[in-house]
Image (cartoon, grey):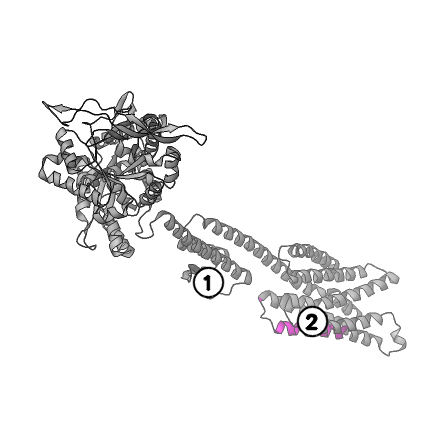
């Protein structure tokens, strides 16, 4: 009954061991412990059933099965011992044990009494010999292992079972032997199950710890995306390791290595040896921290590249725009003022050209350092938005009087003389956003830039964007919008002013002048020419005038001259645009006028003008004498005639003025150039120019610009004396007239009276 009870108890423990073995890890010790426990339960079951059977075949078979189960139990003891406690290789030990048990099983049914004097002694020897082999292996395995309390308990239980088993085999008393045979397995069964329960508890703890480790790794990986602090993440990893591994001595270290890499270590300061799973857990935590630290540093470098100027380390344009918008939105809630200080470095190009870019970069760094420290008492945000342009965003800005003082202090506080005798200084423009205005960061930047440009234009050094400047900007904005609409709607027309022969006063050419027809009122170029050149609208305006001049050539049968802006000649396809507007013929009847300064400053103008001149067009230098020409440069430029500026004609009453005109006439005659004087307003000017050798003249005295062909009327007189003493004459001129042909219109010279 005791064996059956023990068999049931061991069978119940087998279920628990099977649950242990079915876990995630599935260690070999669990499998062999389960197999060993199953054999133990079967041995006890067979022993208990023996008492319930009667002598006969069933009992004999049951005795044989019991003997083989005991043999199997002893054989399994070898690999189970190796899996649980470690030990040497089991190959030879198993072969020896199995061979002895097979021999014993083979001799079981043989009539040994007929051949051996004492068959019981032989049977006992065949049982004790393999048992001795198993015991020897267990002793060797246990001798190599540091026994724990549970291991020592199992050894003691095994020794007791072995002693009872040996006593049952060797003692001849049937009652004592039967009792020993029935009870020998119980101490070992108890030891095995206690060890199994201990290992089962360890396996459950290991599984729980494995889940905790996995959850901790997941939590740390998630925290790595939000903490953005490598040291803080290392502390989190250390605390996770201390909690899960139950080791308060765990510490962590994070140090950088080459190429922006990091290495992290988590270790026990008390040098506690953790199991392999725990060491792997510490390594995984360390790798997460290292990868996060590298990602943080890379993110910081990318953020610096995207939002900071690499030279001055100031915020760049993008960062300034985001900060300005955020500041305006906050000020709109708080009802405070926001000012933007726009600074431009004067003389930066000269420093770069004279001393090199390294010197210019050093100058920019000095400016950045100066601006960082100049407004330390204010809530200032300094950034670099361009090559030599800096801005300062002032949150909770002071009143306009204080802003003027700030702008003056910035202007006067930086004077850099490292670039030579001409110091580099800052030109400052200030614009302010007021509560109630529309939150428009771009408009505030434009206003500050406009104030800076106004300070540069007026040479005052600093300027605040006030009401007067705002009105002027608004007026320019409206004028620009009107100018764009006029260009789009074709409200520009060409007026023609005559160019006459200085002696005969005969019209020899007309100059096409652009006029803006604004709701029936003509606006002269002086009111819109500068804005058109700045905005680039001068290009379509000039092309429209050129097209109308081409039609005037065919209508008036008179050579025409057209003003060409430098902006037109700087276009990439300037030559193609001019060809499209004028056509592909009659270039010899076209004169293109370009100002002296534009001809010198625009490097792309010379090749375009040379190509047009090669096609037959004439090139005239307009407003000659007011620009930068020299005697040597005139000979190299593609020029056919010079136009004396009206300012020199106006000074013809003085000897100095007449001397300048004589010099220009002599220069033109030396280089074989034609000459035209413009701005003739009085008879005295006309007479003096003719006497000096000026061949052609133009001005309001000789004919105002008109949409139709100007026709000279009676000769003007002053008092009783005519300007030209001879009576008026009609002179036959050769002027071009179109003749139709298959290849298109062409011009021929026909007599015409003017």
Q: Secondary structure at mark 2?
A: loop
Disc 1: which residue: 267
How many C-alpha atoms fall within 10 Å of the one at disc 1: few (<14), some, or many (≥20)? some
Residue 627 in picture, x, y percent from top left: 21, 42
The residue stretch that appears in magenta: 127-148
The secondary structure making up most of the magenta span is helix
Q: Nearest the camera: 508 or 725? A: 725
Give me the residue at 77% from left, 69% from top: 177
Residue 102 in picture, x, y percent from top left: 80, 70
Disc 2: which residue: 90
Q: Quadrant of the C terminus?
A: top left
The residues bearing labels 2 and 1 have C-alpha atoms spaced at a distance of: 37 Å
Placement of 528 over or under 150, stated as above or below = above
Q: Is residue 87 magenta?
A: no
Outermost residue on the top side: it is 520
Q: Secondary structure at mark 1?
A: strand
How many C-alpha atoms fall within 10 Å of the one at disc 2: few (<14), some, or many (≥20)? few
Residue 57 in picture, x, y percent from top left: 88, 62
Is residue 377 shown left or right of residue 493? left
Give me the residue at 30% from left, 52% from top: 312
In front: label 2 or label 1: 1
Residue 632 in picture, x, y percent from top left: 23, 49
């Amino acid at each position: 009954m005791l064996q059956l009870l023990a068999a049931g108890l061991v069978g119940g423990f087998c279920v628990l061991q099977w649950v242990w073995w079915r876990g995630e890890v599935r260690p070999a010790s669990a499998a062999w412990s389960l197999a060993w426990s199953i054999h133990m339960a079967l041995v006890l079951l067979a022993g208990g059933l023996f008492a319930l059977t009667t002598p006969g075949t069933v009992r004999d078979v049951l005795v044989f099965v019991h003997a083989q189960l005991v043999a199997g139990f002893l054989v399994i003891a070898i690999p189970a011992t190796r899996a649980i406690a470690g030990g040497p290789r089991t190959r030879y030990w198993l072969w020896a044990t199995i061979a002895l048990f097979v021999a014993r099983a083979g001799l079981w049914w043989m009539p040994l009494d007929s051949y051996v004097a004492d068959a019981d002694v032989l049977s006992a020897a065949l049982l004790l010999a393999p048992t001795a082999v198993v015991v020897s292996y267990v002793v060797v395995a246990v001798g190599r292992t540091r026994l724990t309390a549970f291991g020592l308990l199992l050894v003691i239980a095994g020794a007791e079972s072995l002693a009872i088993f040996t006593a049952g085999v060797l003692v001849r008393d049937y009652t004592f032997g039967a009792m020993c045979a029935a009870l020998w397995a119980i101490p070992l069964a108890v030891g095995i199950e206690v060890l199994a329960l201990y290992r089962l508890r360890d396996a459950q703890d290991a599984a729980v710890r494995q889940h905790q480790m996995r959850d901790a790794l997941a939590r740390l990986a998630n925290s790595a995306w939000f903490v953005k602090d490598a040291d803080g993440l290392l502390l989190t990893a250390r605390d996770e390791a201390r909690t899960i591994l139950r080791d308060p001595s765990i510490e962590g270290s994070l140090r950088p290595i080459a190429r922006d890499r990091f290495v992290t270590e988590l270790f026990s300061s008390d040098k506690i040896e953790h199991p392999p799973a725990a060491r792997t857990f510490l390594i995984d935590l360390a790798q997460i921290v290292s990868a996060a630290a590298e990602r943080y540093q890379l993110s910081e470098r990318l953020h610096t590249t995207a939002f900071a100027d690499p030279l001055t380390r100031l915020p760049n344009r993008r960062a300034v725009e985001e900060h300005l918008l955020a500041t305006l939105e906050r000020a709109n809630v708080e009802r405070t003022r926001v000012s933007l200080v726009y600074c431009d470095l004067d003389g930066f190009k000269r420093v770069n050209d004279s001393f090199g870019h390294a010197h210019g970069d050093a100058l920019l760094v000095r400016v950045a350092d100066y601006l960082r420290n100049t407004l330390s008492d204010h809530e200032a945000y300094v950034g670099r938005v361009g090559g030599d342009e800096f801005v300062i965003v002032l949150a909770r800005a002071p009143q306009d009087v204080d802003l003027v003082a700030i702008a003056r202090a910035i202007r006067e506080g930086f004077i850099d003389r490292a670039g030579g005798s001409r110091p580099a200084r800052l030109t400052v423009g200030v614009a302010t956003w007021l509560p109630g205005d529309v939150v428009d960061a771009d408009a505030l930047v434009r206003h500050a830039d406009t104030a800076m440009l106004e300070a540069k234009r007026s040479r005052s050094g600093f300027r605040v964007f006030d009401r007067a400047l705002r009105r002027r900007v608004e007026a320019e904005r409206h004028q620009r919008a009107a100018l764009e609409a006029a260009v789009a709607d074709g409200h520009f027309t060409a007026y023609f002013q005559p160019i006459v022969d200085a002696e005969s006063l005969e019209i020899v050419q007309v100059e096409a002048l652009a006029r803006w027809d604004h709701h029936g009122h003509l606006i002269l170029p002086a009111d819109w020419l500068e804005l058109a050149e700045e905005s680039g609208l001068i290009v379509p305006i000039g092309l429209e005038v050129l097209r109308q001049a081409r039609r005037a050539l065919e209508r008036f049968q008179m050579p025409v001259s057209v003003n060409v802006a430098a902006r037109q000649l700087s276009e990439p396809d300037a030559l193609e645009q001019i060809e499209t507007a004028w056509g592909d013929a009659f270039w010899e009847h076209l004169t293109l006028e370009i100002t002296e300064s534009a001809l010198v400053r625009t490097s792309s103008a010379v090749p375009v003008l040379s190509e047009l001149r090669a096609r037959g067009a004439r090139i005239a230098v307009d407003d000659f004498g007011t620009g930068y020409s020299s005697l040597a440069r005139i000979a190299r430029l593609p020029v056919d005639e010079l136009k004396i500026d009206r300012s020199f004609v106006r000074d013809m009453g003085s000897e100095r003025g007449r001397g300048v005109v004589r010099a220009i006439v002599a220069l033109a005659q030396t280089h074989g150039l034609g000459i035209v004087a413009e701005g003739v307003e009085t008879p005295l000017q006309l007479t003096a120019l003719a006497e000096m050798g000026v061949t052609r003249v133009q001005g309001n005295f000789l004919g105002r610009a008109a949409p139709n062909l100007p026709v000279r009327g009676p000769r003007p007189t002053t008092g009783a004396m005519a300007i030209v003493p001879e009576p008026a004459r009609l002179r036959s001129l050769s002027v071009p007239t179109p003749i139709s042909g298959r290849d298109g219109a062409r011009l021929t010279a026909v007599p015409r009276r003017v």
